[in-house]
Amino acid sequence: MNNLFSKQGIGSNQSSDEIHVSDKANTAFNPLKQKGGFKILKKPFIYCSGILSCLLVLTMFTFMAVGCEKLKSVFPTSPTSLLTTTFLKVEYAGCNNQTEGTKSQRTIEENQNDTIIFDFQNDTLIITVGVNYICCAKFNAVQNINNDAISLIISDTTASFSEYCRCKCNYVFKYYFTNLSQESYEVNAIIKSPDSSVYKQIFQTFNIDDNEN
């Protein structure tokens, strides 16, 4: 019995020593865990936090960029896209409303070519059309705007052939436009005979960049 108890006692003492040694080992290892362990855990945490921060910033910029694109579609940045090309008036010059001139005047006027001339100043476009036509004719000048196409329709409204004079003159029509909505225009001047048939056509392209002062 004594041997049994002493064996148990020895066994008991060994367990106590083992627990004691373990406690000492844990006590000695704790500072290592506190120093090394936290360092090991801390670096991945900082690394992950950095990645998450970068992803968050990129996500914010992405949403901001998408938002800007949507705003651009609602509010276009081009100034001309907010304008509507507006016709102001047409002025009749040259041989309009004039009777047959002297021979020297007729010779000068006959030597002029059919032309379209552009003058762009202070957001106003002046399109001057010069047309050689029989003298003493009467005209009605109108216009039509379709996006980047401008049609200038000049119709001969002379009531009778007997009203014409036996010579040719240069008739001038000045069209005024403002609030140009396009960077360029295809301008087509159409001169119509009294029967509404097309007598002649003149084409010219207008570009804002080429005519800005």
Image (spheres, helix red, strand yellow):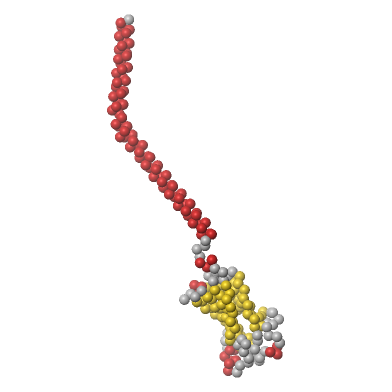
| Residue 52, horizontal then vertical, whole percent | 42, 44
Q: In which quarter of the image is the N terminus?
A: top left
Quick check: 45 above or below 76? above
Which quarter of the picture shows residue 33?
Answer: top left
Counting the numbered discs, the total is 0
* Residue 122 appears left or right of 162: left
| Residue 19, horizontal then vertical, whole percent | 32, 20
Name the residue at 69% across, 82% down: 194
| Residue 149, horizontal then vertical, whole percent | 59, 72
Name the residue at 70% across, 88% down: 161
Name the residue at 49% across, 72% down: 209
Which quarter of the picture shows residue 179?
Answer: bottom right
* Residue 197 appears left or right of 65: right
**Residue farthest along the bottom direction in this orientation:** 103
Quick check: 18 above or below 118? above
**Residue farthest along the front direction in this orientation:** 88
- State whether residue 142 appears in this view: yes
Which quarter of the picture shows residue 90?
Answer: bottom right
| Residue 210, horizontal then vertical, whole percent | 49, 74
The answer to which of 72 and 169 lies nearer the viewer is 72
- State whether residue 116 appears in this view: no
